[in-house]
Image (cartoon, rainbow, N blue to C red):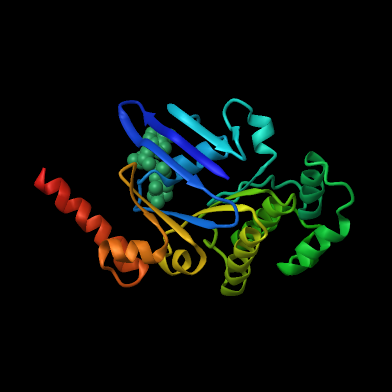
Amino acid sequence: MIELIQYSKTYGAYQAVKPLSLTMNPGVVTSLLGPNGAGKTTTIRAIVGLTRPSAGQVKVQGIDVWKEPLKAKKLIGYIPDRPYLYGKLSARELLRFIAGVHNLGEVTSKIENWLQFFSLEDFGNSLIETYSHGMKQKLTVIAAMLPEPPVLVVDEPMVGLDPKAAKQVRELLQEHARKGNTVLLTTHSMPLAETISEKIAVLHKGQLRALGNMEELKNQTHGGDLEEVFFKLLEEEAQHVAAT
Ligand SMILES: Nc1ncnc2c1ncn2[C@@H]1O[C@H](COP(=O)(O)OP(=O)(O)OP(=O)(O)O)[C@@H](O)[C@H]1O
């Protein structure tokens, strides 16, 4: 479970995220949507312990990420929008290192299965700096999934992935939630969000504009697919601002 309790973030005088309370439940894929600059990455970075909240609390599995960072981070898998990997290691070295940090024990066959799953087995001993963007992204997914984290946070996962890998990652995220884990995803892909998520939260200008499943959002906006719902929500917001 992920809990945001009156979480907010200010950069200088600018309030990037206004007080936000939101719970993401286990067993569910939740998508966090919003236009550029809405505050999605800022929120995600607070959840994974990278950007300190200005106020409020962020908890994973009941643990405050900013009061007990080590305890919390053990529970979180994070797939950032750009793969940040140490280029001087090979994939196998990196994955063994991660297994060590998480005390996973003997994981050789698990690592090999993952590399095969993403067709990386022939490149497992090559330095990561020689990988293409998509290969790095696949490795980032493996690195996050290897410890089987109860909380998985994913920022724009499909960027740079080929169609087969994108489908594999989509199914992985769904399967991970089905096993009872919490999965939070941000994406600009409306078809992806519509296919994958049971719950959708829409942020705009740092504020929560809508929350619910597809049916609830459609009823709220009288929209058709998620793309239409999304635009209607932003339109309503613009009209509201113009009227005030
Ligand atoms: N380190 C920072 N310093 C100052 N302002 C920042 C910083 N990081 C983000 N912001 C601002 O906070 C706001 C929210 O940014 P954020 O990256 O969270 O948006 P986003 O919803 O992830 O956008 P995108 O879809 O473009 O990735 C933006 O106005 C951005 O300029």
In-image side of 206 versus 26 (left or right): left
| Quarter of the image where ligand 1 sits | top left
In-image side of 49 versus 23 (left or right): right
Nearer the observer, 39 or 91: 39
- At 77% from the left and 68% from the top, the residue drawn is 116
Location of residue 7 in the rendering, given as x and y in whole percent from the top left corner:
43, 34
Inspect this view and state whether residue 114 appears.
yes
- At 35% from the left and 71% from the top, the residue drawn is 225
Nearer the observer, 5 or 8: 5
Residue, far left = 243
Inspect this view and state whether residue 53 appears.
no
- At 81% from the left and 58% from the top, the residue drawn is 111
Above or below residue 60? Residue 12 is: above
Above or below residue 132? Residue 168 is: below
Residue, far right = 106
Q: Give the tally of numbered discs.
A: 0
In-image side of 89 versus 140 (left or right): right
Location of residue 195 in the rendering, given as x and y in whole percent from the top left corner:
49, 69
Location of residue 134 in the rendering, given as x and y in whole percent from the top left corner:
61, 62
Which image quadrant for residue 190?
A: bottom left
**Quadrant containing the N terminus in the rendered view:** top right
In-image side of 189 versus 242 (left or right): right
Nearer the observer, 100 or 153: 153
Above or below residue 115? Residue 54 is: above
Location of residue 51 in the rendering, given as x and y in whole percent from the top left corner:
50, 33
Which image quadrant for residue 133?
A: bottom right
**Quadrant containing the C terminus in the rendered view:** top left
- At 35% from the left and 51% from the top, the residue drawn is 36
